[in-house]
Amino acid sequence: MENTAPDKKDNWENGPQKALLALGIVFLFFILYSLFSETNPKTRQSTASNLINTKEIANLSVTRFVYNGIARTYKENGDHDYNVLYKSTVNVSIDADGIGYAVDEDQKKVMFIFPEFKIENPLIDISSISTIPDRNDLYPDELIKLCKTTAFEEASKSEKLISSAQENLKSIIEAWYSPVFEGYTFEYQFGVTEGGEAK
């Protein structure tokens, strides 16, 4: 009488090997198809997440605005009350994950599309705060809030701040991508500047 047990064992061992071989052939087919396909467009579009590790860079700091300001206060009847002198720092950032680009292979151009700049809440140097005339009856929290509001308003309407942010961002992008797109010219499209509420 023949013993068929060894044949059953061989079939059980060879089953996974045959499945892996078939999977490998299918995978090889897709690789070859992608390499030799002629349907690739000449203009590629993507987001910065393909080129920038956005897990490490969420908000890309672009420029810093240092402002020595004077906040003026007024009484309820409209008369001038007192002035507050202060030093502040305002950062302008951009959402790195929102940066996109389109590549024109024929023209050798790369168009970078940026989301809006964001003007961050000002940082006030508390030690720099002083009042004219000198006042000792004022709450520090109220003075800081007043200084933040004034610094934010000044930063928001500063054309120099936005143009500086644009130029700095261009320099950052060119430093990052010139080695990737060697021989290409870069063009830029900027979004509208966004300001958060000063708190």
Image (spheres, grey):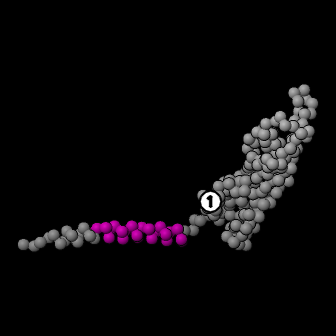
Residue 39 x, y percent position in the rendering: 57, 65
Q: Where is residue 95 in the image (x, y as percent from the top left)?
A: 68, 53
* Residue closer to the observer: 31 or 196: 196
Would you say the magenta stretch is mainly helix, strand or loop?
A: helix
x then y, percent, for residue 9: 21, 70
Q: In which quarter of the image is residue 53?
A: bottom right
Q: Mark 1 points at which residue?
A: 56
Q: Local crowd at mark 1 within 10 Å, few (<14), some, or many (≥20)?
A: few
- Residue 17 occupies which quadrant of the picture? bottom left
Residue extending farthest to the left is 1
Residue 33 point in image, percent of width and height: 50, 69
Q: Which amino acid does label 1 sit on?
A: Glu
Q: Report if residue 108 is visible in the image.
A: no
Q: Quadrant of the C terminus?
A: top right
Magenta stretch bounds: 15-36
User: In the rendered view, does 20 fall on the left or right side of 126?
Assistant: left
- Image quadrant in which you'd find residue 146: top right
Residue appearing at x 16%, y 69% in the figure: 5
